[in-house]
Image (cartoon, helix red, strand yellow):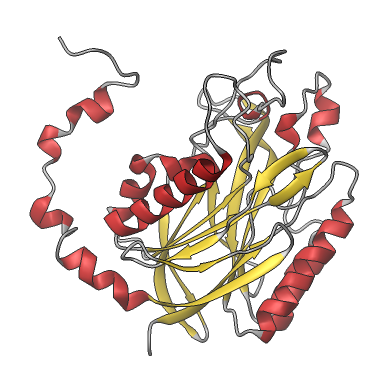
Amino acid sequence: MARVVTVGAAQLGPIQKAESRESVVERLCALMEKAHRRGVQILVYPELALTTFFPRWYMADWAEVDRWFESALPSNTTAPLFAAARRYGIGFHLGYAELTQEADETGKLRTRRFNTAVMVSPAGEVLLKYRKIHLPGHAEFEAQRHAQHLEKRYFEVGNLGWPVRRIGWDGIAPANMGLMICNDRRWPEAWRVMGLQNVELVMLGYNTPALNTTNAGHESPHLRVEHSHLSVRAGAYQNATWAVAVAKAGNEDGHELFGSSIIVNPQGQIVAEASSWQDELIVADADLDLCRLGKTTIFNFAAHRRPEHYGMILDRVGARDPD
């Protein structure tokens, strides 16, 4: 069987704070129907695809916070998306805010909140789950910010690592698939951990503002897009994998998200790119055998890596001046 998978990036336009989950799910289903007409087999939705990017709002009441979270998948609200996947025979990646009752590292059962992504089969089975590890932003209200970025307040650091699974179903040859979320794409460690598991398809969603709101220095909007693309292209090239990076885009209650979703091949080339700030589908045929060149030559890890010299990467968290 040819190892070609038709992948789709389902970019979402803005989701306003007042928009209902039901309305958002209708939009997701419309994109899936369009993907079916274009022969897509795996469809990738963005980070926090069911809601606005709520970490930009400070909330002191945790009951108010929890209304942005999902405690089960599928839920009554998301069931139409799972039904559409079964109808069309499409597997999908979905980013969402996950609320769970789960034991923590001490063994205590408690409420836990994660920024989560799942890979779901056409039959509705969750085949792979990832919880975001590189949480950006801050944990408390900061008055100097144009918009808050409170991921460190509302989410715990993910506890599942970066698992890669060999996934396939009827009509799709098995492929090594992995997930990351948003800020993870900027960290080469995330890509390399999956690269060391021979990943062939990385799916990631993001919600990235067009402006840097920290006032720490100027970063032009066009450079923010460039830096995002650079991170994905480098990660795909240096680990010889396909990557589908899918955004939320447009003006959410006065806050711009830059969109610019892309599909990247194992040589780091952008093969498809979104051109709007609206709900938009881009598609590419991902020949997974194209991963072989990089994995067996320049990035043949078994032949060329020298982990005995990489100890500082694990031993040191913050940078400091040389001795």
Residue farthest toward the bottom in the current orientation of the protein: 1
Residue 101 in the image: x percent, y percent? 68, 36
Task: Give the vertical position of 147 relative to 78 (above or below).
Answer: above
x 30%, y 70%: residue: 291
x 30%, y 61%: residue: 198
Residue 18 in the image: x percent, y percent? 91, 43
x 22%, y 65%: residue: 294
Which image quadrant: the N terminus?
A: bottom left
Task: Give the vertical position of 275 relative to 63 (above or below).
Answer: below
Visible residue check, residue 86: no
Residue 4 in the image: x percent, y percent? 42, 82
How many marks are shown on the rendered structure?
A: 0
Examine the image and state in which quarter residue 74 appears: bottom right
x 27%, y 53%: residue: 196
Q: Nearer the viewer, residue 225 or 59?
A: 225
Q: Nearer the viewer, residue 61 or 285?
A: 285
Q: Is residue 273 left or right of residue 303?
A: right
Residue 210 in the image: x percent, y percent? 63, 40
Which image quadrant: the C terminus?
A: top left
Visible residue check, residue 204: yes
Q: Is residue 319 left or right of residue 261?
A: left
